[in-house]
Amino acid sequence: MQTQARVSLSDAESAACETAKEAIGWLHTARFLTTAAQMHHLPAYDLPEIAFVGRSNAGKSTSINVLTQQKKLAFASKTPGRTQHINLFALGRQGQSDAVLADLPGYGYAAVPKSDKIRWQQVMANYLITRPNLKGVVLLCDPRHGLTELDDILLDILRPRVEEGLKFLVLLTKADKLNKAEAAKALSIAKLQSSGGIVQLFSALKKQGVAQASQILWDWVHTADDPLHQAAESAILDVDKDDPKDTGDLLPPH
Ligand code: GDP
């Protein structure tokens, strides 16, 4: 009974899933594209890119896996040698990619040497400030810890771009661990701190907020008046022409 209660969705959640079917299906197409240790190693795409960022252990990998309905996708980013990399995944049907998902390494992990932390913060800041096709950022935050100092630094870095139209979503992860009052409090605090971004509760465990988040990401990419969206069609072939070895070594095509 316990397990059933955990996975069953509320009526509101089921209704949201129904409306977000297209968005949910779109995220399911995610497939590994490439990995890069440095910003300048990242391929240049015209496709809109959505970056996932967050403190280490915030639940980023689990959330990406639930959003894409793939058990191991983001754990590709946790394989040795890739933990400090930016990992890119293509979205859209094979041969018709229309967006890129970027999984940025978690920050703030205590066991990482200071020099690595600084190097990584620089790579991330550089990415967030200069990546030309960056369309939106999803910040994963464990609400039991709230937005930490490092999250604040990230918000400061992002603010100018958000003011210029960069989309921004804060997912308060592991919401299943909060009671109603705690959830409401976490939401209002994060809303205050996130300067204009959308904030929502999310639980990978209970599949809470998955449909809503999927719909938001879909809307970011598929807004018709967006120049990146218009450029997407011509860039589709470039992404899909990428080294087939790269796209195939972690995930079988589906
Ligand atoms: P990352 O370092 O940000 O990629 O974090 P992970 O995705 O590896 O998750 C860190 C820990 O939080 C793991 O033990 C996950 O099982 C747990 N976790 C992630 N999402 C949830 C959730 O929605 N609910 C609960 N209860 N635990 C979660």
Image (cartoon, rainbow, N blue to C red):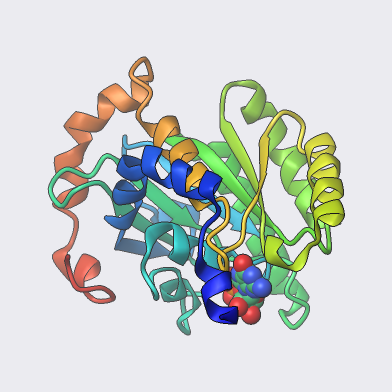
- Residue 74, quarter of the rendered image: bottom left
Residue 139 appears in the figure: yes
Q: Residue furthest top?
A: 225
Residue 189 image point, x, y percent: 86, 43
Kindly identify the residue that appears in the image at 16 percent across and 43 percent down: 96
Residue 147 appears in the figure: no
Ligand 1 placement by image quarter? bottom right
Residue 72 image point, x, y percent: 39, 75
Q: Is residue 14 above or below residue 2?
A: above
Kindly identify the residue that appears in the image at 86 percent across and 52 percent down: 181
Q: Is residue 38 above or below residue 161?
A: below
Kindly identify the residue that appears in the image at 17 percent across and 67 percent down: 253
* Quadrant holding the N terminus: bottom right
Viewer-proximal residue among 17 and 46: 17
Q: Disc count in the image?
A: 0
Residue 203 image point, x, y percent: 61, 61
Viewer-proximal residue among 211 and 106: 211
Residue 206 image point, x, y percent: 57, 65
Q: Is residue 75 above or below residue 65?
A: below
- Residue 20, quarter of the rendered image: top left
Q: Residue furthest front?
A: 1
Please give left or right for residue 254 compared with residue 216 in the image.
Answer: left
Please give left or right for residue 226 compared with residue 84 in the image.
Answer: left
* Quadrant holding the C terminus: bottom left
Q: Is residue 139 above or below residue 45?
A: below
